Image (cartoon, helix red, strand yellow):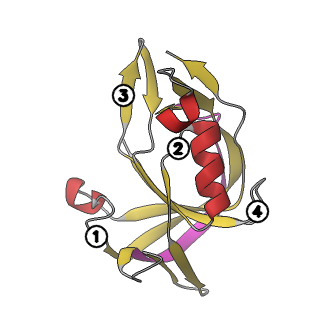
Amino acid sequence: MGAVMLVHYENADCGPYDELLYIPGFFEHNNKTYMRITKIFVSSQASVEWGRRNWAIPKELADFEWRQGKKEWHIDVRQPKTGKSIYSVSLSPRFFSFPITTSLLPWKLLQKQEPQYSQGEDFYLETALDGRGSARICFIDRVEGSKDFPDYHEMSHGPRIAVAIDPFKMTFPVATKVR
């Protein structure tokens, strides 16, 4: 089970920003199960720097455009210098809202620290995320990937659905070193 997430952070320590990320699924390290973010784009240079430094998340900069109507949402992510599309999706929110929390699926993120932040050490950073909010099911009406972002729809079969969580409060605690 993997995930593609589009997030609009209204408040964060590094300021408001948007992000598109890909988690391909679970993996094992030292007999524990983790998830890893393998591709991620964000709209803020501060988020790029602090995400890499504090949690070893390999963030890259991109431009985001959110168009949110009552019946359909459109999100476009583009390369900042060329304007070339990275990812584009149209969603239709449906049904009722329901509570959601990470305590139901307590997973940890494990990311390998980059050499420029590791002072010559070889280690990972483990982060136990905590979040809760109100969710709605969405149908994915249209999605277009690119060579810059994994085309997960080609990898998976079944209905094209998503979960929109609004409001959502997430806490990113200090990461722990793991060898």
The mark found on residue 168 in the picture is: none
Q: CA distance from mark 2 to mark 4?
A: 17 Å
Using residue 51 as the reference point, say whether residue 28 is left or right of it. left
Q: Are marks 2 and 3 in contact (CB under 8 Å)?
A: no
Identify residue type, mark 3.
Answer: Phe
Mark 4 surroundings within 10 Å by alpha-carbon count, few (fewer than 14), some (14 through 19), many (20 or more): few
Residue 32: image location, x then y, percent: 45, 17
Examine the structure image and report whether residue 10 is included in the region drawn in magenta: no
Calculate the distance from the C-alpha at mark 1 to the C-alpha at mark 3: 25 Å
Q: How many marks?
A: 4
Percent x, y for residue 15?
76, 62
Q: Which residues are magenta?
A: 87-108
- Look at the image and say whether residue 89 sits in the magenta stretch: yes
Label 1 belongs to which residue?
A: 146
Q: Earlier in the sequence, mark 1 or mark 3?
A: 3
Residue 173 position in % (x across, y down):
72, 35
